Image: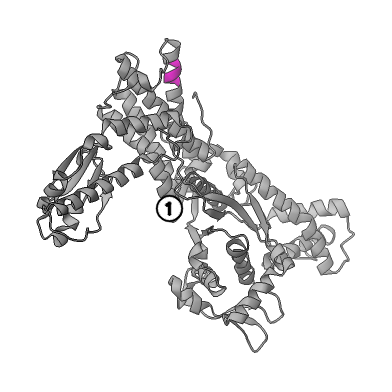
């Protein structure tokens, strides 16, 4: 059998549904059930395998249509099931009021072990059908160092992109550089003041409160002065600011790329906001919105966007959340100021138009901080307003991170005396721990990142626990080979029943891997895979503790070695997918 894109759970559910539909139609054909339209029904994987490998509510769902008690319906349907020997099931039972429970056959268990142990790409599926998805994440302003929130956003975005790829989507990782607009003007002003202070003193040139206060601004100003001296001291403000921006911004962007590279994040696209202005894309979007009536000119000459009208479809017709968490009435919003300068919102519309229309992505996924909650409906509505489909823009809102040590919050770096940055963090904890732990919870949950846990090398640290399971399997296999026991292939264990509960639990978890990948991709929740692989590691430790390998009978021994190989492959695939080291000894 070709196990490429094999999803054992999906295949089992699909076959169960088809068999039950076939049996119900056969029961209607011979009069065991009255003729009726087949009702919608569920086939699912029960939480407890005692209730089968697949359970269905078909009999209960059909009670009204067939005008019989559910148990009588279940008996009629199961009596008309085809010979199970030719299916993935070996028996069926009726439980309770009429649940139909089907139990997987030996051949299905064997297929799962073969797929996991022989296919290096096991877990990949073609579910996404090659649809082109753009995942934009981090996108920190290039005016200073990245913070702890960017560490979480980086892990979530990169891991989400990875599960989408494994689920069969074509993924582009993108960083949106806000290298234009108010924050860049503020950047230039901050640099200008710090540069002048070097020659005139802080009293003569006080730094306004609205400017960037970080030590990195002083560092850039000093580096600029080392290169140019006082050449720009008496230049006009615009010239001096531009020169400082042109010098400092590329350095900051290079540092962003370097720091993210250290975090094992590589982007396919670094998209500059400035290109949207230079190309006329922002103006083109404004003109298009004016032509459609989504915008209008105010008396002072500003161009206003009818925000509430288009945001209503996405659930915020009348209110939006402000930065302080309160809500205010949604009003028409400025796209172009009276002085002719576009707002950030105008550029943001043009940027998403570029992704969905110009570059033609099937879906644009943005990872945003939770403080951008009120902007979601505005952006989705703006896509509708400009003639696109707002449902093609999805936003994952990420809650805040609390950095913890010794049970107490940590906000300041002892080394620098400022807020802890991404680079500070990566100097404090292993990158493996950072990437795994920041992807340990759903984005919508606030999280505490425990520095003490991140550096621990024991089973309390989930990434260590998973890596140890992989290393342990490698050690077991090495020891067996050193004693003359090598894996001889599937023929050496053909017909093995996998009857032990610990074996069955492990096989069922291996079977779940491709389905978990698909669910993670559908729900934009890569944390599912962290929990899955931790469960798999736990199930392996349990299996090895209760099922002998070294002194087992030859067929049993070979089957269990195959189970070890399959488990090792899945753990390796998860860790590799998430760019985490895969140790073979610990």
Residue 479: image quadrant is top left
| Residue underneath mark 1 | 522
Give 6 or 484, whichever is nearer the viewer. 6
Give 235 or 173, whichever is nearer the viewer. 173
> Is residue 571 visible in this depiction of the protein?
yes
Residue 375 position in % (x across, y down): 52, 68
- Tell me if residue 406 is in the magenta stretch: no
Q: How crowded is mark 1: few (under 14 residues within 10 Å), some or many (20 or more)?
A: some
Relative placement, left or right, of 511 versus 229 is left
Give 535 or 46, whichever is nearer the viewer. 46
Name of the residue lying farthest toward the bottom: 299
Which range of residues does the magenta coloring cover?
475-479
Relative placement, left or right, of 222 versus 399 is right
Give 394 or 244, whichever is nearer the viewer. 394
Residue 79 position in % (x across, y down): 14, 44
Residue 306: image quadrant is bottom right
């Amino acid at each position: 059998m070709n196990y490429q894109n094999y999803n054992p759970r999906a295949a089992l559910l699909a076959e169960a549904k088809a068999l039950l539909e076939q049996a119900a139609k056969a029961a209607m054909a011979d009069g065991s059930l009255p003729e009726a339209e087949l009702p919608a029904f569920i086939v699912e994987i029960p939480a407890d395998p005692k209730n089968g490998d697949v359970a269905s509510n078909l009999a209960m769902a059909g009670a009204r249509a067939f005008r019989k008690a559910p148990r009588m319906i279940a008996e009629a349907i199961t009596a008309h099931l085809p010979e199970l020997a030719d299916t993935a099931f070996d028996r069926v039972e009726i439980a309770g009021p009429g649940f139909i429970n089907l139990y997987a056959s030996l051949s299905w268990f064997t297929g799962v072990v073969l797929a996991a142990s022989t296919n290096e790409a096991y877990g990949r599926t073609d579910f996404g059908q090659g649809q082109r998805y753009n995942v934009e994440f981090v996108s920190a302003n290039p005016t200073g160092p990245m913070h702890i929130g960017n560490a979480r956003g980086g892990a979530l975005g990169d891991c989400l992109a990875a599960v989408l790829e494994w689920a069969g989507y074509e993924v582009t990782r993108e960083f949106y550089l806000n290298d234009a607009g108010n924050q860049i003007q503020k950047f230039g002003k901050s640099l200008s003041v710090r540069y002048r202070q070097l020659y005139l003193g802080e009293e003569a040139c006080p730094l306004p409160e609205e400017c960037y206060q970080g030590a990195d601004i002083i560092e850039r100003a000093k580096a600029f002065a080392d290169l140019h001296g006082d050449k720009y001291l008496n230049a006009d403000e615009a010239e001096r600011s531009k020169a400082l921006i042109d010098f400092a911004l590329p350095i900051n962007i290079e540092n962003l790329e370097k720091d993210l590279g250290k975090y094992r994040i590589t982007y396919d696209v670094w998209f500059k906001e400035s290109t949207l202005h230079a190309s006329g894309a922002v103006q083109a979007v404004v003109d298009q919105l004016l032509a459609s009536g989504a915008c209008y000119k105010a008396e002072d000459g500003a161009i206003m966007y009818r925000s509430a009208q288009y945001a209503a479809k996405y659930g915020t017709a009348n209110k939006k959340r402000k930065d302080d968490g309160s809500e205010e009435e949604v009003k028409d919003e400025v796209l172009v100021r009276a002085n002719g300068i576009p707002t950030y919102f105008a550029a943001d519309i043009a940027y998403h138009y570029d992704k969905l229309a110009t570059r033609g992505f099937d879906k644009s996924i943005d990872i945003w901080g939770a403080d951008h909650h009120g902007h979601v409906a505005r952006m989705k509505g703006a896509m509708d307003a400009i003639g696109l489909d707002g449902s093609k823009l999805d936003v994952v809102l990420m809650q805040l991170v609390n950095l913890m040590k010794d049970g107490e919050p940590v906000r300041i770096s002892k080394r620098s005396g400022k807020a802890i940055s991404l680079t500070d963090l990566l100097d404090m904890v292993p990158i493996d721990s950072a990437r795994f732990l920041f992807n340990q919870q759903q984005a919508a949950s606030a999280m505490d990142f425990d520095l003490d846990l991140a550096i621990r090398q024991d089973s309390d640290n989930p990434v260590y626990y998973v890596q140890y399971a992989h290393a342990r399997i490698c050690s077991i296999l090495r020891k067996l080979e050193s004693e003359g026991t090598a894996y001889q292939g599937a023929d050496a264990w053909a017909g093995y029943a996998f009857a032990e509960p610990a074996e069955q639990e492990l096989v069922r978890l291996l079977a779940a891997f491709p389905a978990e990948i698909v669910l993670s991709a559908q729900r934009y929740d890569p944390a599912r895979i962290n929990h899955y692989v931790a469960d798999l590691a736990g199930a392996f430790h349990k299996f090895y503790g209760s099922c002998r390998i070294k002194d087992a009978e030859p067929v049993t021994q070979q089957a269990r070695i195959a189970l070890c190989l399959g488990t090792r492959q899945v753990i390796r695939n998860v860790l590799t997918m998430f760019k985490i080291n895969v140790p073979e000894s610990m």
